[in-house]
Amino acid sequence: HALARKTWLFFETYVGPADNWLPPDNMQEHPVEVLARRTSPTNIGLSLLANLTAYDFGYIPGGQLLERTRNTFQTMAALERHQGHFYNWYDTQYLRPLPPAYVSTVDSGNLAGHLLTLLPGLQALADAPVLHAKLFPGIRTAHAILHELSRTLPLTGEQQLSPLFTRELDSACATPPTSLSQACVVLESLNRHVDEFSRGLNQVSFSSTTSTPGSPSDKQP
């Protein structure tokens, strides 16, 4: 699921209040980073299903799924439309249709299909347990990606994520907590390990930005 988690990172990062909970069309990385702040009915529908998929894979809890869905729906309700149909392109910050304003039957059909798929997923939440069975496996997927990335950083042993994190997470995946109180205990412990790891990363980031070629710290006595 590593690829799925990395894909979700786009929606997690860029679909938020800065763009009125609408998904930007794309993020250009090279030669310079440029976020395309425009969206279409197809993009919106895909983003809504990305929320549902993230929940199914244990990347976000049910409450966050509902919140993200509600925020997007509220924006959609405010968008200008033509005889009930969404235009094909909107500015995600100012919510104006982009010229030339037109309706695409393809994109409208895509959105309709996405919404029909989203509906039963949301309805199923009513009978779903609060403690999602995929919660800890979802965390483990993120941990695997983080572990791979951390190997490229000049971290000391003390700055590495504690082995206790891995053991506690593996234990929670093998024998999931059976109550919310038990889950909270595990999550709080995991969070403490992550906080320690974050402090180590901040130290590495600070040292890399303050130590530049030719600076006094680089000169030999």
Image: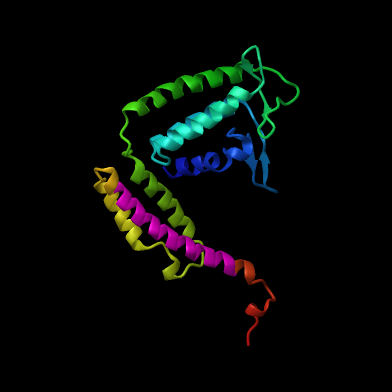
The reply, left or right, for residue 132 in relation to residue 116 is left
The reply, left or right, for residue 62 in relation to residue 34 is left
Q: Residue at x 63, y 84 (%)?
A: 220
In front of the other: 120 or 179: 179
In front of the other: 180 or 99: 180
Q: Locate residue 22, reporting x and y percent.
A: 59, 32
Q: Residue at x 34, y 62 (%)?
A: 163
Above or below: residue 73 compared with residue 9: above
The reply, left or right, for residue 142 in relation to residue 211 is left
In front of the other: 20 or 47: 20
Above or below: residue 215 compared with residue 109: below
Tell me the magenta residue range. 183-207
Residue at the bottom extreme, as displayed: 221
Residue at the right extreme, as displayed: 99
Count up the numbered dots: 0
Q: Locate residue 34, reporting x and y percent.
A: 68, 43
Q: Quadrant of the C terminus?
A: bottom right
Determine if the magenta segment contains residue 201.
yes
Dominant SS in magenta: helix
The reply, left or right, for residue 182 in relation to residue 42 is left
Q: How is the image coloured?
A: rainbow
Q: Residue at x 45, y 37 (%)?
A: 64
